[in-house]
Image (spheres, rainbow, N blue to C red):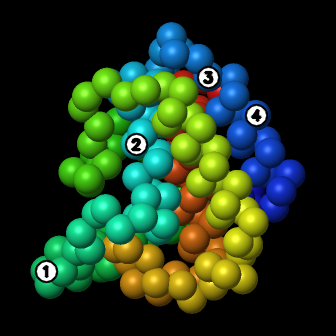
Amino acid sequence: MKNIFDKVVTDEVIERINQLNPSTKPNWGKMSVDQMLAHCNVTYEMDFENKHPKPKGLMKWMLKTFVKKVVVSEKPYKHNSRTAPVFLITNEKDFKAEKERLITYINKTQALGADYYDQRESHSFGKLNKTEWNNMFYKHLDHHLTQFGV
């Protein structure tokens, strides 16, 4: 898996994002391009913002036990996979604002670097090592950028 903490890879991902426009259509799925960008931003909101309540109790156990391995592994996501409710974006979003926000988050993540993330507590999965963080960030972006043909 490519390393999102590598500036070359970050620049490549941003170039792919910059190929999108408000009328870009998906190859599969129901999201519009503005919704997809907002959807991708949720991962970073969970890391940098305090706007999503942390899971507790049974839900936290289920996420760590069953979902974590799917999210942090190198195995690609299947097309039309189910997503957590917090990631569902059903209303129209501002394409330009979501795009700029995503690029800012990606650059911030890259600047912080892999060592910053090593053994850092994630919103939903407990402590992750830097490889797991990378896989979670890169795999999700790559999945959705591929969904939109870039």
Which image quadrant is residue 55 in? bottom left
Sooner in the amino-acid sequence: mark 3 or mark 2: 3
| Residue at 24 percent of width and 69 percent of height | 53
Contact between labelled residues 3 and 4, with CB atoms less than 8 Å apart: no
Q: Nearer the viewer, residue 37 or 147?
A: 37
User: Which labelled disc corresponds to residue 44?
Assistant: none
Sooner in the amino-acid sequence: mark 4 or mark 3: 4
Circle 4 residue: 15
**Three-letter code for the amino acid on which mark 3 is drawn:** Leu
Q: Position of residue 79 (x, y in %)?
A: 42, 37
Sooner in the amino-acid sequence: mark 2 or mark 1: 2
Q: Position of residue 100 (x, y in %)?
A: 59, 38
The reply to whether residue 109 is in sight is yes
**Three-letter code for the amino acid on which mark 2 is drawn:** His
Contact between labelled residues 4 and 2, with CB atoms less than 8 Å apart: no
The CA distance from mark 1 to mark 4 is 40 Å
Circle 2 residue: 39
Q: Position of residue 129 (x, y in %)?
A: 59, 83
Say whether residue 115 is left or right of residue 24. right
Circle 3 residue: 20
Helix, strand or loop at label 4? It is helix
Q: Residues within 10 Å of mark 2 (few under 14, many from 20)?
A: many
Helix, strand or loop at label 3? It is loop
Residue 56's place in the image compared with 112, above or below, is: below
The CA distance from mark 4 to mark 3 is 9 Å
Say whether residue 24 is left or right of residue 123. right
Q: Nearer the viewer, mark 2 or mark 1?
A: 2
Helix, strand or loop at label 1? It is helix
| Residue at 25 percent of width and 28 percent of height | 91
